[in-house]
Image: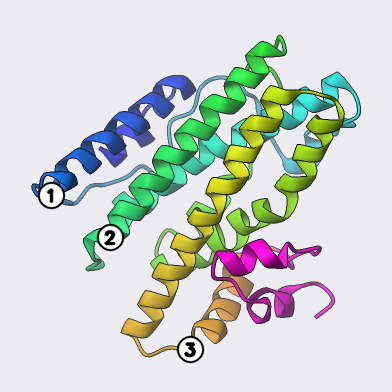
Amino acid sequence: MAVEVLGTPDPREKAALSRRHADAWRAAREVGTPLPVGHAAPPDRPARPDRPELKNPRDVPRRRPGSPEGRRALLHAVAHIELNAVDLHWDVIARFTDTPLPMGFYDDWVQAADDEAKHFGLMADCLEAAGSHYGALPAHAGMWRAAEDTAADLMARLAVVPMVLEARGLDVTPGMIEIFRRAKEDDAVAALEIISAEEVAHVAYGSKWFHFLCGRHDLDPKDVFHDLVRRHFHGPLKPPFDEARRAEAGLPPDFYWPLTENA
């Protein structure tokens, strides 16, 4: 199921398939006949549509969010992040099945993949309501780099993707919401508020299973986190941090402040 999502290039179809598979997983769990986890060979990179054109991050045009064009570009960037997150969560399910894990691990990441598919749909709907669509603008080519850099290490994957990249979303999404609120774009505000609320759980899943694996191997989570992020994440973490939302997700300040450029 995970590999099928990863191999689907059309964004809307990928999101719809993600949601159907999540529904099937939950339905089987609820009646006490869980689907077998099994093993699969996920692709090195997920299937992608011809558009958007993927560019080096430095070559993606920057647009001011005070203009309608800038706000469409911001929605497009969030849609791109959410589509990549769909693949990241199915990839963590498929790639690490050689590691024995409780069924709760799969429950959490199936739920996260379902949420991200919903989030992509919300952003794609907002773009279409604004007279645009996903794929209309160039996008960041480096989104899958974290998956490639951590493909051989589940603890590194958890440290870098949910506990660094998704945690960054906790810091910046409230500011995005304010941009659309000032522009009186209520549908975008409502969509981003849903995303903002649900992303806390995804960071929490990362923290929970990272700590679980550290406990299994009798390792200090903070020290291991610092080591893995320094090895697998490119560059320092950048404040400001939303410390309250990070704490809600199980990320205390002594995890991330030592990794800033001023540390």
Q: Is residue 231 magenta?
A: no
Q: Secondary structure at mark 3?
A: loop
Disc 3 packing (10 Å; few <14; some 14–19; many ≥20): few
Mark 1 to mark 3 CA distance (whole Å): 32 Å
Q: Nearer the viewer, residue 197 or 230?
A: 197
Q: Which of marks 1 and 2 precedes in the sequence?
A: 1
Name the residue that disc number 3 marks.
220
Mark 3 to mark 2 CA distance (whole Å): 22 Å
Tell me the quadrant of the picture where the C terminus can be found: bottom right
Disc 1 packing (10 Å; few <14; some 14–19; many ≥20): few
Question: Of discs 3 and 2, which sits in the foreground?
Answer: 2
Which three-letter amino acid code belongs to the residue tagged 1?
Pro
Total numbered badges shown on the rendered structure: 3
**Magenta stretch?**
235-263
Question: Of discs 2 and 1, which sits in the foreground?
Answer: 2
Q: Which of marks 3 and 1 precedes in the sequence?
A: 1
Left or right of 109 on screen, residue 169: right
Q: Is residue 157 visible in this depiction of the protein?
A: no
Specify the farthest residue to the top.
131
Q: Which of marks 2 and 3 precedes in the sequence?
A: 2
Q: Is residue 88 above or below residue 49?
A: below
Res 91 label? none
Rendering coords of residue 131 (x, y %): 71, 9
Q: Is residue 240 magenta?
A: yes
Mark 2 to mark 1 CA distance (whole Å): 13 Å
Q: Is residue 160 visible in this depiction of the protein?
A: yes
Name the residue that disc number 2 marks.
104
Q: Secondary structure at mark 2?
A: helix
Q: In percent of the image, x 36 and y 42: which residue is there?
A: 43
